[in-house]
Image (spheres, rainbow, N blue to C red):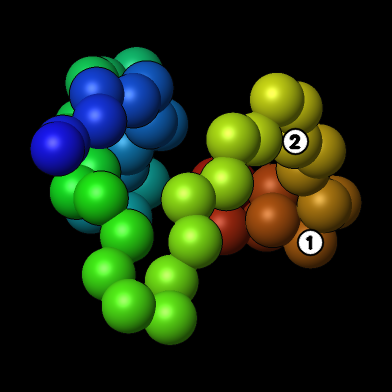
Amino acid sequence: MVHKVKAVVVREKNAPVSLETILVPDPGPGEALVDVLTCGVCHTDLHYKL
């Protein structure tokens, strides 16, 4: 089964980000599917955007 999830995607350096629906396959052997409800952004991550 494939799961439709929302993802923030950037295609190239200094390009704007977009919110897209992507397809994620079921986990394979030794993998797990995790439902992330919230996520923080590290200050260091912002340097890649600037």
The three-letter amino acid code for the residue at tag 1 is Thr
Examine the rendering and report whether any part of residue 6 can be seen: yes
Examine the rendering and report whether any part of residue 18 can be seen: no
Tell me the number on the disc at residue 12: none
Query: 48 or 2, which is in the foreground?
Result: 2
**Mark 2, residue position:** 39
Question: Relative to residue 16, is residue 4 drawn left or right?
Answer: left
Query: 32 or 10, which is in the foreground?
Result: 32
Q: How far from the left and from the top, in percent, is residue 43? A: 85, 51
Q: Mark 1 and mark 2: span between their CA atoms?
A: 15 Å
The three-letter amino acid code for the residue at tag 2 is Cys
Residue that appears at 32% across and 78% down: 29
Query: 2 or 45, which is in the foreground?
Result: 2
Q: How far from the left and from the top, in percent, is residue 33? A: 48, 50
- Residue 2 against residue 30 in the figure, above or below: above
Helix, strand or loop for disc 2:
loop
Q: Which residue ends up furthest to the front in the rendered image?
A: 29
Helix, strand or loop for disc 1:
helix
**Hey, which quadrant is residue 35 in on the image?**
top right
**Mark 1, residue position:** 44
Q: Which residue ends up furthest to the bottom in the rendered image?
A: 30
Q: How far from the left and from the top, in percent, is residue 28? A: 27, 70
Residue that appears at 65% across and 35% down: 36
Residue that appears at 37% across and 22% down: 6
Circle 1 residues within 10 Å: few <14, some 14–19, many ≥20: few
